[in-house]
Amino acid sequence: MLRYSEEDKPTVTAVPTVSIVVPVYCRTEAHKGFLVETLESAAAQTLKNIELVIVDDASPTDPVRAIESVRNLPLTRLLRNTVNLGHAESRNIGIRAAEGELIAFLDHDDLWLPEKLERQVRALQENPDAAMCYCNVEIIGSHPPNLYVDQRAIPDRPSIVWFLTHGNSVITASSALVRKQAMLDIGLFDTRYTSCDDYDAWIKILMRWPIVHLPETLAKYRLHEDNVNYSVDRLNDNRLLTNLILSYWRAAPVSDKLALLPLLVRKFAGRAIYTVARIGRSRRTK
């Protein structure tokens, strides 16, 4: 059963170490099934001082029965958006409501191995200067693609240049454990993006603090035919991301500037391509 709603939240005497933020958008029965498996993987965590903050993003099908069917859930809150706000703002709502000092993100169709949180909490304890820890992931589904990045080659503490030059496939949200204060300090997830808002957040964190890579496969990222497809505005996202990279580049050491020049050239070339494509679509619709 759900322990309480946001309206009648009881006093929590023991502050949880980790708050698990789960943005939910259930539009099919398959989604509900994935959600149950996701929550079961959260309930099976060996780290017990945790809470679950589920943010229902105005799902077309009510997820409550699916949530209540999962046994041995930790202390759980269900927050409901009255309108669909998207995954970025739903995560932000969960972060603001979280009681824990550490935030773990778990998308509603992904899975964790039982020791995921315990291993990551230990890694951050061993690296007190780091703002975030992320683990390796396995991509699952009926026909999962190969990862774009060989996870065996990821440094223990990737630099911002390494991270930027390896693209938006190194860290999935469900693999990350982040200090809540770091998320607040960067302004949470940027809701102006239509995609890659998490990539934006990881870059902003790396611009200020180290992050730690835990070279263990402790999360599973699910690809399936019922994945929610958000409408992606590639030109908008390119502009936002390029401006962020430029803000780092302008003050970066010369070695970093040189290393990032090819990336910036590709970003500006992509912007030109997306702009031409948009103009072409606009003309065809007239």
Image (cartoon, helix red, strand yellow):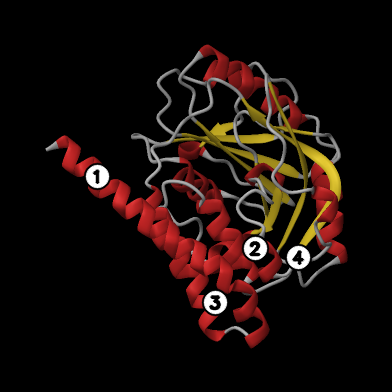
Q: Residue furthest top?
A: 29
Q: CA distance from mark 4 to mark 2?
A: 11 Å
Please state if 18 lies on the left or on the right of 214 as rendered: left
Find residue 158 and name its label.
4
* Tag nearer the camera, 3 or 2: 2
Question: Residue 204: where, in percent of width, then height?
Answer: 57, 67
Q: CA distance from mark 3 to mark 2?
A: 14 Å
Question: Residue 258: where, in percent of width, then height?
Answer: 62, 79
Question: Residue 15: where, in percent of width, then height?
Answer: 70, 52
Task: State the residue in front, 286 or 22.
Answer: 286
Question: Residue 180: where, in percent of width, then height?
Answer: 63, 59
Three-letter residue code for mark 3: Tyr
Q: Judging from the image, what secondary structure is the residue with disc 2 in?
A: helix
The vertical placement of 64 against 278, above or below, is: above
Three-letter residue code for mark 2: Thr
Identity of the residue drawn at 19% across and 37% down: 284
Residue marked by disc 1: 280
Q: CA distance from mark 3 to mark 4?
A: 16 Å
